[in-house]
Image (cartoon, grey):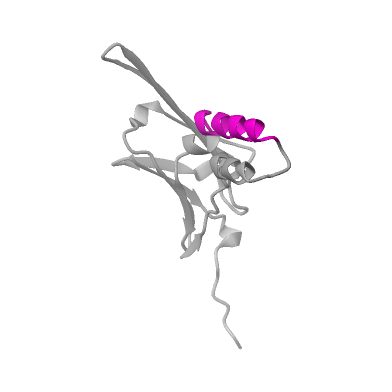
Amino acid sequence: MKLIRYAYPQSQASSAFNRLFDFGAPAIGRIGSLMDDFLATEAGFNQPAVDLYEDEHHFYARFELPGVNKDKVDLELENAVLTLRSQEASEGDEKLSRTQFERSISVPDGVDLEKVSAAMDAGILTVTMPKLEARKPRQISVK
């Protein structure tokens, strides 16, 4: 089984912290920019974690969705891009809380797109992508 390590993008907050020490800009502008970056919402924090791996017959994408109801999950496969979306609003104690996220990944070459399936169990969404017959390893006899 091969694992693909996901490289997390650098957050805007860390780049904002680095800009604080940029001595070419006025200090007030640097601090204002820093505060804007820390107080703004970032798309990177609204993306669920995903593990990508494969075995002999399938590729897998495992999304971590703690606390998300499977009825609120929208999974779409279009042009070899798998997109996961969810949007939920809940009310409590005079507050309206909204949770939404979106994550897209490229489907590897050699996937039978007609047979892709998904199952959710205990906050883990597993998308199974079967390999095409041509991509599966085959044993070649030596004569």
Position of residue 52 measured from the top left corner of the image (x, y, whole percent): 49, 53
Would you say residue 5 sits in the magenta stretch? no
- Residue 114, above or below 87: below
Position of residue 12 measured from the top left corner of the image (x, y, whole percent): 58, 40
- Residue 50, above or below 28: below
- Farthest bottom residue in view: 143
Which residue lies at the image location 60% right of the left edge and 29% below the top edge?
A: 32
For the residue pair 92 and 77, the one nearer the viewer reads as: 92
Position of residue 49 measured from the top left corner of the image (x, y, whole percent): 45, 45
Please state, as top left, top right, bottom left or bottom right, where the C terminus lies in the image.
bottom right
Q: Is residue 30 left or right of residue 13?
A: right
Q: Magenta segment, which residues? A: 26-42
Residue 132: in sight, yes or no?
A: yes
On the image, which quarter does residue 113 sit in?
Answer: top right
Would you say residue 32 sits in the magenta stretch? yes
- Farthest top residue in view: 94
Which residue lies at the image location 57% right of the left edge and 51% below the top edge?
A: 111
For the residue pair 124 and 118, the one nearer the viewer reads as: 124
Which residue lies at the image location 33% right of the left edge and 14% below the top edge?
A: 95
Q: Main secondary structure of the magenta part?
A: helix
- Farthest left residue in view: 93
Image mark count = 0
For the residue pair 111 and 36, the one nearer the viewer reads as: 36
Which residue lies at the image location 42% right of the left edge and 41% below the top edge?
A: 118
- Residue 134, above or below 70: below
On the image, which quarter does residue 72 sit in?
Answer: top left
On the image, which quarter does residue 121 sit in?
Answer: top left
Position of residue 15 measured from the top left corner of the image (x, y, whole percent): 60, 44
Residue 83: in sight, yes or no?
A: no
For the residue pair 1 and 32, the one nearer the viewer reads as: 32
